[in-house]
């Protein structure tokens, strides 16, 4: 069981399942019911590929071991990593071919943006466009990609007139939720980011102010969730937001959990998974 758990977490399958959970939560937040749609597979495989793309390129093109402590599993299990990565690419292609054209085109655009951001990190000097030189772009892109993937794809799939008020409220809720988490991950990577000249919020304002900002974003997330659920007559789902808020607030403040090597990969990623599951739970038992 321990080996399986390490595989799911270190291979990035765990965070991929969390992305799917959040997307299913969106289906419910839009007033619908959980459904198996091609875009769920796109979200799963695209998340897996995106989180492993840099790993794959560094290992294959540069023939270098991965330096980050979180990548030690990949260094030791390269054959297994290559196999799962290639299978994920195949799965993503199949899912895209079975998706609606508008969904496929939207995903391709987001993929291009994320690749343009990732490639300069790999020091491909022939590229003149280096998005990583733009201060604070990292957290914005994380918020944008997650919000688009887990909110806009279900909306595009519906093929109906978009209620921009509810869409903006839901997108803002996802922005705030992911933003609060992204700051905590940036705190972990502050040394590595500084070494490559990447300006992030923690590297500019320090740890204490970054933690405060994360808490502020969580508070706005809770407020926005309440407004959204009240406006859409889905107030029975609000406890999901409240519980997620309290869990994340505990994670932000817990000095004990922060000492765990699994703080980010298990607990913080798990908070994303939990939020989607909570939405489904209150939907089923309201």
Image: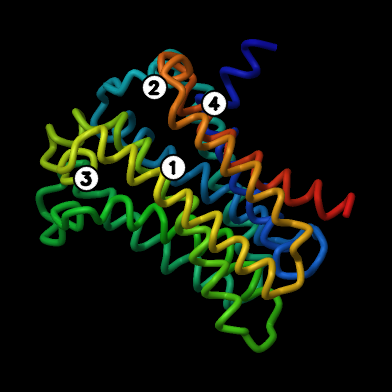
Whichever of callouts 4 and 1 sits on the residue coming sooner in the sequence is 1
Q: Is residue 170 left or right of residue 216?
A: right
At x 52%, y 33%, the residue is 12
| Residue beneath disc 3 | 200
Mark-to-mark CA distance, 3 and 1 = 14 Å
| Residue beneath disc 4 | 266
Whichever of callouts 3 and 2 sits on the residue coming sooner in the sequence is 2
| Residue beneath disc 1 | 181
Whichever of callouts 2 and 1 sits on the residue coming sooner in the sequence is 2
Question: Residue 70, which numbered label?
Answer: 2
How busy is the neighbourhood of tag 1: few (under 14 within 10 Å), some, or many (20 plus)?
many
How busy is the neighbourhood of tag 4: few (under 14 within 10 Å), some, or many (20 plus)?
some
Question: Residue 25, which numbered label?
Answer: none
Residue 17 in sight in this render:
no
At x 39%, y 52%, the residue is 142
At x 26%, y 26%, the residue is 63
For the residues carrying marks 4 and 1, which lies nearer the camera in this image?
1
Mark-to-mark CA distance, 4 and 2 = 12 Å
Q: Position of residue 78 (x, y in %)?
A: 45, 21
**The residue tagged with tag 1: helix, strand or loop?**
helix
Q: Position of residue 211 (x, y in %)?
A: 33, 37
Vertical arrangement, residue 63 with respect to residue 205, above or below:
above
How busy is the neighbourhood of tag 3: few (under 14 within 10 Å), some, or many (20 plus)?
many
Vertical arrangement, residue 151 with respect to residue 125, above or below:
below
Q: Position of residue 215 (x, y in %)?
A: 41, 43
**Disc count in the image?**
4
Front in this rendered view, residue 192 or 124: 192
Quarter of image, res 195: top left
Q: Is residue 280 left or right of residue 116?
A: right
Whichever of callouts 3 and 4 sits on the residue coming sooner in the sequence is 3
Mark-to-mark CA distance, 4 and 1 = 13 Å
């Amino acid at each position: 069981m321990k080996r399986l758990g390490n595989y799911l977490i270190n291979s990035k399958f765990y965070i991929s399942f969390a992305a799917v959970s959040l997307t299913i939560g969106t289906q419910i937040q839009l007033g619908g019911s959980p459904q198996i749609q091609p875009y769920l597979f796109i979200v799963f495989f695209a998340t897996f590929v995106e989180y492993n793309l840099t790993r794959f390129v560094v290992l294959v093109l540069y023939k270098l071991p991965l330096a980050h402590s979180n990548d030690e599993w990949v260094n030791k299990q390269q054959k297994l990593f290559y196999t799962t990565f290639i299978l994920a690419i195949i799965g993503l292609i199949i899912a895209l071919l079975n998706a609606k054209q508008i969904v496929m085109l939207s995903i391709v655009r987001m993929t291009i943006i994320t690749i343009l951001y990732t490639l300069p990190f790999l020091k491909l000097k022939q590229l003149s466009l280096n998005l990583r030189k733009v201060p604070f772009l990292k957290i914005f892109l994380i918020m944008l990609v997650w919000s688009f993937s887990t909110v806009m794809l279900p909306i595009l799939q519906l093929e109906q007139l978009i209620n921009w008020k509810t869409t903006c409220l839901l997108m803002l809720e996802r922005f705030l939720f992911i933003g609060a988490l992204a700051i905590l991950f940036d705190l972990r990577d502050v040394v590595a980011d500084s070494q490559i000249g990447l300006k992030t919020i923690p590297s500019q304002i320090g740890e204490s102010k970054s933690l405060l900002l994360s808490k502020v974003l969580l508070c706005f997330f809770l407020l926005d969730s309440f407004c959204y659920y009240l406006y859409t007559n889905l107030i029975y789902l609000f406890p999901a937001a409240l519980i997620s808020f309290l869990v994340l607030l505990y994670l932000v403040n817990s000095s004990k959990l922060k000492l765990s090597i699994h703080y980010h990969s298990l607990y913080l990623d798990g908070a994303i998974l939990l939020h989607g599951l909570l939405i489904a739970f209150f939907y089923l038992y309201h």
